[in-house]
Amino acid sequence: MSDSIIVNGNKVEGEISAKTDLHIEGEVIGEIRSEASVYIAESGIVKADIHAVNVYISGKFNGSVEATEFTHVYSGAIVKGDIKTPSLEFERGAKFLGTLDMDFEDEEEPTTIDLDPDNTEKLENKEDKEDKEEEKSITSSRSYFDRKKKSQQ
């Protein structure tokens, strides 16, 4: 299958469903559903809600984006609306006015951040425990020698 292209100068209104990549060089108003990627070229003007795997914006976009894998907003792009994606890249010079959601509620496991990646807390606790045991051993040894010394006197 080949990609679908809406060339510059053409305007499409309504709902678009695509199984392959969709390249927009012209104008789209409505809703876009793609099982692949959607590319909005520098000449592209899109006023729509987009549901796709990946979305790449170089032109003008007004609406909402829901990308299941990745969204890239290129330098010079103008985006007004909402973006929901687990991974995002904004290039310097891109303009954005809207909301950004990078946390999908339907994830099987919540995202966690290891605040102690080097396990320093565990190491410190282990070292503290070892120090206490050593101190206890030294104290016991002193007590033994003190008792022995007293018994010899």
Image: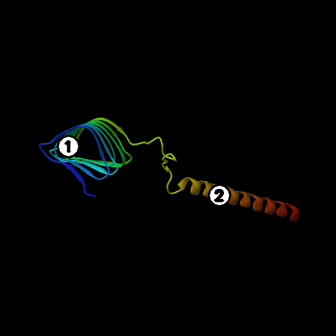
Which comes before the other along the chain, label 1 or label 2? 1
Amino acid, disc 2: Asp
Give the quarter of the figure containing the N terminus: bottom left
Between residue 35 and residue 105, name the one nearer to us: 35
Tell me the SS state at disc 2. helix
Between residue 98 and residue 126, name the one nearer to us: 98
Residue that carries the numbered disc 2 in the rendered image:
131
Outermost residue to the left: 9
Give the quarter of the figure containing the C terminus: bottom right
Picture coordinates of residue 5, whole percent (x, y): 20, 50
Residue 4 lies left or right of residue 88; in this view the side is left
Residue that carries the numbered disc 1 in the rendered image:
77
Q: Could you say which quadrant of the image residue 30 lies in?
A: top left
Picture coordinates of residue 149, whole percent (x, y): 82, 63
Picture coordinates of residue 152, whole percent (x, y): 87, 65
Picture coordinates of residue 73, whole percent (x, y): 25, 46
Residue 36 lies left or right of residue 6; in this view the side is right
Question: What is the crowding at mark 2: few (fewer than 14 residues within 10 Å), some, or many (at least 20)?
Answer: few
Between residue 139 and residue 73, name the one nearer to us: 73
Judge depth for marks 1 and 2 and give the one in front. Answer: 1
Q: Could you say which quadrant of the image residue 32 lies in?
A: top left
Cα distance between the residues tagged 1 and 2: 60 Å
Q: How many marks?
A: 2
Q: What residue do we see at 57% from left, 57% from top?
A: 123
Amino acid, disc 1: Ala
Between residue 122 and residue 60, name the one nearer to us: 60
Tell me the SS state at disc 1. loop
- Specify the color scheme: rainbow
